[in-house]
Image: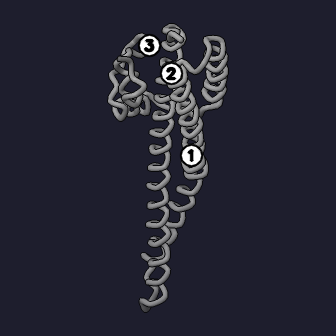
Amino acid sequence: MPVNKENLALVRQSFASSSLGHKVQEVASGRKEGKAKKIDAWNITIVSGVIISLGLQSVIPGNPLVFTYLGLTLSVLEIILLIVQLKLNNEKESIVHKNTAHMYMGLRDKYRLLIADILNGTLSDRDAARQRNELQSEYQTISSLAPQTTDKDYDEAMQRLTLVKDQQNAWSDKQIDKLLPKELRLK
């Protein structure tokens, strides 16, 4: 059965978009996780400072006020940092980005299987179009529920995938082939 080139082209475009969606969400997850770890490190540092200042107050004779003020200042900083941590919610957002990346990854793999089936001629044009439309619907659902990312996340994802940014919102065959195993690339 000859390959329906138009259908294959649409599936390949969607495959590339889901591959990029996966990588962008993965990058965003890493960014949020990095911020969460920095805040955790600051929390540990400040709490350690509070504990050390309390310890010094109890072992140094005459209980100098400097340790009281130091402990009080560090305690206030810790409270402010905890409020910031709760407000930013980086850890939970990282998990949501990671889960979305996994959904895109699963979709990407389904597209890869569909490309293989189209190239092998194991699907009728009607079945291939039906599967393509179902996957497109799944892509739209994932995209509509995906958490917001930044331009930097997008740029980093493009760099990690070794893709060149263009202004056409279309993928070249060469770019798509970079994302596919050799067996599924256009000859």
Identify the residue position indicated by label 1 in the image. Answer: 88
In terms of sequence position, does the residue under pointer 1 or pointer 3 come before the other?
1
Q: Which residue is mark 2?
A: 120
Between residues 89 and 170, which one lies in front from this camera angle?
A: 170
Q: CA distance from mark 2 to mark 1?
A: 49 Å
Q: Residue flagged by tag 2: what amino acid is it?
A: Asn
Callout in the foreground (2, 3)? 2
Is the residue marked by circle 3 packed among few (<14), some (14-19), or many (20+) residues within 10 Å?
Answer: few
Residue at 53 percent of width and 33 percent of height: 109
Question: Is 167 or 161 nearer to us in this picture?
Answer: 161
- Residue 26 pos. (x, y %): 48, 40
Residue closest to the eye, 178 or 66: 178
Which label's residue is closer to the chain start, 2 or 1? Answer: 1
Q: Position of residue 98 (x, y in %)?
A: 55, 43
| Label 2 – label 3 distance at C-alpha | 25 Å
Amino acid identity at mark 1: Leu
Q: Is residue 175 above or below residue 30?
A: above
- Mark 3 element type: loop
- Secondary structure state at the residue bearing disc 2: helix
Any mark on residue 170, and which? Answer: 3
Side (left or right) of 97 relative to 48: right
